[in-house]
Image (cartoon, grey):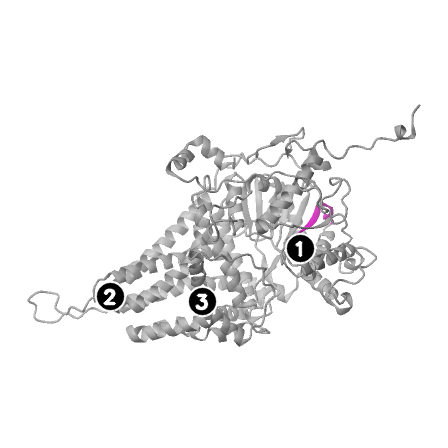
Amino acid sequence: MMTREDRTIPVPRLVPPGLADRRAALGGTDTNVAPIPNAAPVAGTLPFAPMAMPVQVLERPRGLLAAMLALIPGPARRAERGL
Amino acid sequence: MSAPASGPGHDRNTAGQETPDGASETCGIPPSLPPAGRPDMIKGPGARAIMLRALALTLSLTAGCAGFMLFLRFGWADGRDAMDMLRAALIFAATCWLAWGAVQALAGLTTRPPRMSERMAQAEPAGLGRCAILVPVYNEDPVTTFARIAAMARSLDLTGQAERFHFAILSDTREADISAQEEDWFRHLLAETGWQGRIFYRRRSDNRGRKAGNIEDFIKRSGAAYDFAVILDADSLMEGETMVEMLRLMEAQPDLGLLQTLPRVTRANTLFGRVMQFSAAFYSPVFCRGLAMMQGRTGPFWGHNAIVRMRAFADSCGLPELRGKPPFGGHVMSHDYVEAALLARAGWTVRVDDDLGGSYEEGPGNVVAHAKRDRRWAQGNLQHARLLTAPGLKPWSRFIFVQGILAYVSPVFWLGFLLASIAAPLFAPPPDYFPVEYWPFPVLPVSEASMAIGLAIGIFGLLFLPKVLIWLDAAIRGRSSGFGGRIRALGSVLAELLFSSLLAPIFLMYQTRALWQILRGADAGWPAQARGEGQLSLRAAWAASHWIVSSGGIGLFLALWLSPALVPWLLPVLAPMLIAPLIISWSSGHSHSGLFRTPEEMAEPPVLALHRLILDRWQAPEAKDDSGAPVAAHTQPGAVLAEHA
């Protein structure tokens, strides 16, 4: 026999799998982070929609050997792309 | 040509939208654009830009060489010595720098921006992109700042495109009482604008990375919810139509990573502030046009009043901490130049559109506030010396770094030249009236004073001619009507020339001190911006400039002792130094002069008028309680602002 709870229409899953963990890793206890990512923005809470921002390479490596390695196309191109 | 990079941990979802670690479509928000523009079509800066750059550099170097030769002929008339060579080299560097500015103005005067109708035709709006308007604040007055946001929100409402925009107030405020006020006024802002759910406020507990870190923090948390971000300063104001236009332009050109506007300085009420405001309104568009002609696809970013493509910015502009301690290590201070260079490195176009109106900011009200800001900018620009060899940068980006460094090093050329000229008699060879052996009659040295006079005329020409030509252009094309008409504009130009001549030696000293402090390793820190600072008492001006008076006195004494003939030539430099406190205090007073009128003074732009009306109401005594918090917010969201439609 079905219980009342069983008949409840399932709520669509708004939080993608794994997102809760990432939110926790980013400081999910911050009250400024919306509990449901951007589904219905609450006044004053930023939408939670993370985007990666890789750190770029700006300085050439120190030392003669490292500087020469940086001139080789492969590593240099990776360095250009911030990897 | 490298395409924008995908950072580690990225992959693509079915819609082609990159997401970090496979996170879903921007957390509920469907991707509104095709995959971020891949600038595969970019080939280079364009032949026209390369030609202009080459021409400008050639002309600047030619002017520098001419100065060098003229000075050598003058200096060697009484015998050759090392001091003459040093002075000629300094004249070469200083003249090159002056000529570079003049050539930029000439380039701006001889070219026109594309007509608005052409640009609008290019910009077919997709109408899907979402844009975050980022307002970083740091110990600012919340009432003034949030009133600006209310004015911009209202201005956006009037465009009919407001639903595409969100505001994010990104607070780095450290002062507890100011942060409490920010929260109070934020609630008031929401209640008045009716923008609940579209204006956000958050305060960082950790100010890592300062302003650049503040924006990075936003992108890492919320960037995927938006396609574009308009980056503002706390004192920025932009018309809603301008922001919509910028959005259209970004959507129309998928390889455009950043679009910069030329903000007009407004709301100045001191003499110093109004002169700067006039300069920014009258001269800057022409200089900026010249820069725009040379930028190619490697234009500038000035840190605010610009729009960026979110994914391009996120992929390309994560800034590292530089090795070592400040001032040359640590956080990148002038991050905007670096971000522009990084976007260009990744293949995105960075562009300044000098004819995009409706973009405003405020400036310092007196010399001391200006010098404080300059101190930070100097440190930021000199720090770029570390990045000149950064891998993969476009040559023009490296040149822009050099240009920024020279802006703060060039005063040293002039100071070095003046000091070397005072000291020159100590190094001069004794006069030789009998240079030819066995010749019984003395040979008197030929005066080459005409060379020195020619050089002086040339240098003053490089300084003044561009400004006079800009007036002539404005008078012919009718632009002067916005500045009170031809005659009043001419009066303003002449008065500005006089005023800037008075201030130049004072700034020379401030910039030289800043350079000295930075080279000694002193860090400028991160002081809150001094906005709206005005009147300075004579005592305060003396406290800030007594060392300039002392330096001027020592310079005059040395000149009288070592080179009395040089004193009349040095007086235009030494006299303003000797009366620096008077000039600083006088120029900080309120100005009601009919000169220095600007179009914004003569006809207040809509968003400025909105801001003034809102601010007047918010600052009224009955609008705040004893603690400075707003009294009960209005019950009809947006109703009050609707009155200002």
Magenta highlight range:
B160-170
Residue B504 has which mark? 3
Please state which of residues B577 and B627 is positioned toward the viewer in this rendering.
Answer: B627
Mark closer to the chain start, 3 or 2: 2
* Amino acid at dot 2: Phe
> Which amino acid, mark 1?
Glu
**Frontmost residue, B341 versus B223:** B223
Please state the chain letter of the residue tagged with numbered disc 3 in the rendered image: B
Q: Nearer the viewer, mark 2 or mark 1?
A: 2
Q: Residues within 10 Å of mark 1 (few under 14, many from 20)?
A: many
Q: In which chain is the residue bearing label 1?
A: B
Which residue in the structure is indicated by mark 2? Answer: B427
Give percent across and percent down for residue B107: 46, 53
From the viewer's perspective, is B611 left or right of B562?
Answer: right
Front: mark 3 or 1: 3
User: Residue B102: in sight, yes or no?
Assistant: no
Q: Position of residue B167 (x, y in %)?
A: 69, 50
Position of residue B276 in the picture relative to residue B138 (left or right): left
**Identity of the residue furthest to the left in this view:** B438
